[in-house]
Amino acid sequence: IMSNEIDIRNYIEFAKELTLKAGEIFKCGFEGQKIVEAKEHEWDLVTDYDKKIEKQLISGLKSKFPDHEIIGEEDTAEGKKEPVLTDKPTWIIDPIDGTLNFINSFPETCISIGLAICKELSGGIIYNPLSDEMYTAIKGQGAFLNGKPIHTSCVTELKKALIELEFFSLRFSSKNRDIILGRLDAVLHASRGIRHIGSAAMALAYVAKGALDSLHMDHLQPWDVAAGVLIVREAGGAVLDAKEERYDFMKPNTIAAANCTLAMEIKELINNTDLKTMRKRLTRT
Ligand code: IPD
Ligand code: CA
Ligand code: CA
Ligand code: CA
């Protein structure tokens, strides 16, 4: 299926409207009562609003675009299925990114929707209903915040960079504790400062608008990054895989930065630090 630019623009316009409507439910949940449950692990939480919002987005997209595919976080969890990407237009949905923030009424949380066509990221929407900030991008057409163009920062040196580190998933694996602490120490010393806001999608949006200079996050899922990666790239930024040569948003170990120079610096620092940590591990045993 080939989609032309006009199709993609129409898809994204429709999805923006749908996201704004979903934002109303999001705000109700943020301010009111919610049912909180654990998924497979006690730290992996979901609320009735994650499910409600995802259902509404899926049914809206399905009825408008019956031949499109959809990968949603909660739907994937429920069906215990592996997300597979085909060449068909595929919507990749995170109904609430930063569920823990949402539960705690900590306002760094958003709805994230990416669109892949022929396995390539073609459109992205990140919407924080609380601040009413909508970040959007279409491949080749730039990145926008509430309709105004945004750009990544000009910082190319690590020592001048403000960096987001997300350790959420790694935190629970004691095997990786020394890896995490090693990276934390290295980045803290090499940079101007570290942030951890608890929403991968918001962090990517902040890199896109230059509020953060860079970020590094491990063990993410496609729905955490699909929209944000395109928005960062369209804002002039670079996205690399922390370990591999090629970045694959379906298996993301993400380094996103204002530019390639900064992204490469962080990649090198992370990998050198991990090597040191592993050497220490060996001498200990
Ligand atoms: C999480 C957030 C968090 C990141 C986790 C994600 P969720 O998404 O993006 O910042 O560190 O790895 O799972 O579960 O709140 O949608
Ligand atoms: Ca989740
Ligand atoms: Ca997420
Ligand atoms: Ca989520």
Image (cartoon, helix red, strand yellow):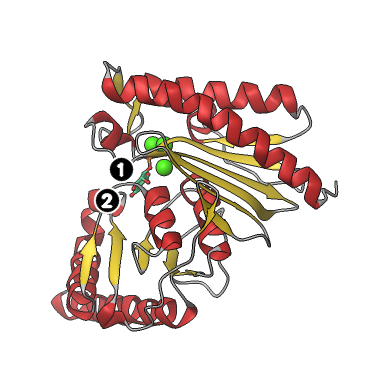
Check mark 1 vs ligand 1: CB closer than 8 Å? yes or no: no
Mark pair 2, 1: CA separation: 7 Å
Q: What residue lies at 54% left-to-right and 57% top-to-bottom?
A: 231
Q: What residue did someone put label 2 on?
A: 197
Earlier-in-chain disc, 2 versus 1: 1
Q: Is residue 208 left or right of residue 11?
A: left
Q: Residues within 10 Å of mark 2 (few under 14, many from 20)?
A: some
Q: Quadrant of the C terminus?
A: bottom left
**Residue type of the residue flagged with mark 2:** Ile
The image quadrant that residue 131 belongs to is top left
Asked whether the residues under the numbered discs 2 and 1 touch, taking CB atoms below 8 Å apart as contact, a structural biologist would say yes
Q: Position of residue 254 (x, y in %)?
A: 44, 63
Q: Secondary structure at mark 2?
A: loop
Residue 53 is tagged as none
Q: Residue at x 68, y 62 (%)?
A: 140
> Which residue sits furthest front?
148
Q: Position of residue 245 (x, y in %)?
A: 55, 75
Q: Nearer the viewer, residue 55 or 280?
A: 55
Could one spot residue 44 in this view of the protein? no
Q: Answer above or below: position of 13 versus 219.
A: above
Q: Nearer the viewer, residue 278 or 119?
A: 119
Q: Quarter containing ligand 4?
A: top left
